[in-house]
Image (cartoon, grey):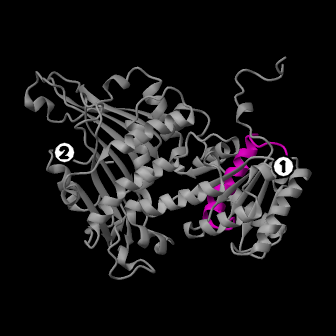
Amino acid sequence: MGNPLRTAQDRRLPRIPEPCALVIFGVTGDLSRKKLIPAVYDLANRGLLPPGFVVVGFARADWGDGSFESLAYAAAKKGARTPWREDVWQRLSERFHFIPGSFDDDDAFDKLATTLDELKERNGIAGNAAFYFSIPPAAFPLVLNQLNRTGMADPSKTGGWRRVVVEKPFGHDFQSAVQLNELVDDVFIPEDVFRIDHYLGKETVQNIMALRFANSLFEPVWNSKYVDSVQITMAEDVGIGSRAAFYDASGAARDVLQNHLLQLLAMIAMEEPTSFDPQEVRAEKLKVLKAISLPPDIATGSVRGQYLPGWVAGERAVGYLEEPNIPADSTTETYAAVRLGIQNRRWAGVPFYVRVGKRMPRRVTEIAILFKRAPHLPFDPADVEMLGHNQLVVRVQPDEGVVLKFGSKVPGTSMEVRDIAMDFQYGEAFTESSPEAYERLVLDVLIGDRTLFPDAAEIEQSWRVIDPLEAAWAGNKPEPYRAGEWGPRASDEMLAREGRTWRRA
């Protein structure tokens, strides 16, 4: 007999995990304080965490539970998306624990194993635990080996499931990604490894699949017969902040293009899966990644840039080489653009222009599908000079929504046609605000839903796209562009050679 108090509209129950622990390595770092702890509070506030749920923090600070609780309180209250409720926090904070130690400290990891065993009985978590690596990639092998040594990664020893969450970047090239995959899969079984790309947790990214596969309006024209080109843009108005050491060793292509933007490309270009089973979705994305072709001449089909001093949003911005802790002779790119192709029947001949940049005029991430012009226009040229390509634009951030741009007659006696836009915004169409990406992804980890997490094959195939670019760029100086501009002039020239222009985001 069903629960008479539960309505058919309540869809929370299948999305509530089993009792479990979330172990956060690097719990005092920026990611944990800004994203993970607020996400845990928001999940608790929405009633999506199970009874007995516990958070165990691990970091190199010599704190007790009380001090950690104070840090967590400040982080949650500052970053919470949902309304603040002291009673919710009080219940949640009672289940917070902190273990101080470094990653090479055997005693600290032994204590962590003992703590999880105690919580197994005291909180009824049945040995279920997820380990979140909110730590530098260089520390991954050390922590993995500790988890392996103590048996904390082995479900047969712990009596419940054990999962691991690994943040990007996953390696710095194809070979290092393969080695890291082998190490992770040696400690955890592949089905328990969650490689997180927070872009895939954004509602607007997930809406790509709903937009395409739940409507008969778009899919018939989602191919080379009707699409002229696709542009994917991720522009940031900020500089590198406190990430100088990491960013100068990585650059824009490794930092963002290899993961976020290639994942967006795969979702836009993939075939319809037979279901939303994680294996089916990832299989279709992998087909796209394998079909990507680089430009025949990388020198003319791609552009690297580095920002100079300039003005952004009315404020003076220093150049990349003047940023703190950046070498004066650095050739690291802060802008990257490339023309990619997809060698399959659906997309043959359609260019995918992908660009990412820092210190751009404004922050925006969007995917623009530009359709071919109508085959015959029975209008005088002057009547349609203001008419451009029909466009479908998916805005990922910050103004989440979808824009459909098409031509319409201007009121008056003459037949003048110009572009207009129909604009759908999440904030106006739905009463409930969109969950934060980490809110959704943390919940998926605890449930065991891997749909939004790239697997090892996707990661490795993405590096197969990036590595030839990095090899061709090696030793070359990036093109300069001023902070507050939309990238180097060479980027505009790359499209102009094919009779196209960047969409002004």
Residue 197 location (% of width, % of height):
52, 51
Q: Is residue 392 placed above or below 153 in the rendered structure? A: above
- Mark 1 is surrounded, within 10 Å at the Cα level, by few (under 14), some (14 to 19) or many (20 or more) other residues, namely few
Q: Is residue 136 placed above or below 153 in the rendered structure? A: below
Which region of the structure is painted magenta? 26-52
On screen, residue 167 versus residue 411, left or right, reads right
Q: Nearer the viewer, residue 299 or 310?
A: 299
The image's mark for residue 242 is none
On screen, residue 58 versus residue 236, left or right, reads right
Residue 22 location (% of width, % of height):
74, 54
User: Label 1 is placed on what type of residue?
Assistant: Asp
The image's mark for residue 500 is 2
Q: Secondary structure at mark 1?
A: helix
Residue 65 location (% of width, % of height):
83, 67
Residue at x 33% of width, y 48% of height: 505
Q: CA distance from mark 1 to mark 2?
A: 57 Å
| Residue 381 in view in this figure | yes
| Residue 86 in view in this figure | no
Which residue, as the protein is rendered here, is positioned at the far right? 122
- Among the 4 quarters of the image, the one containing residue 110: bottom right
Q: Nearer the viewer, residue 238 or 157?
A: 157
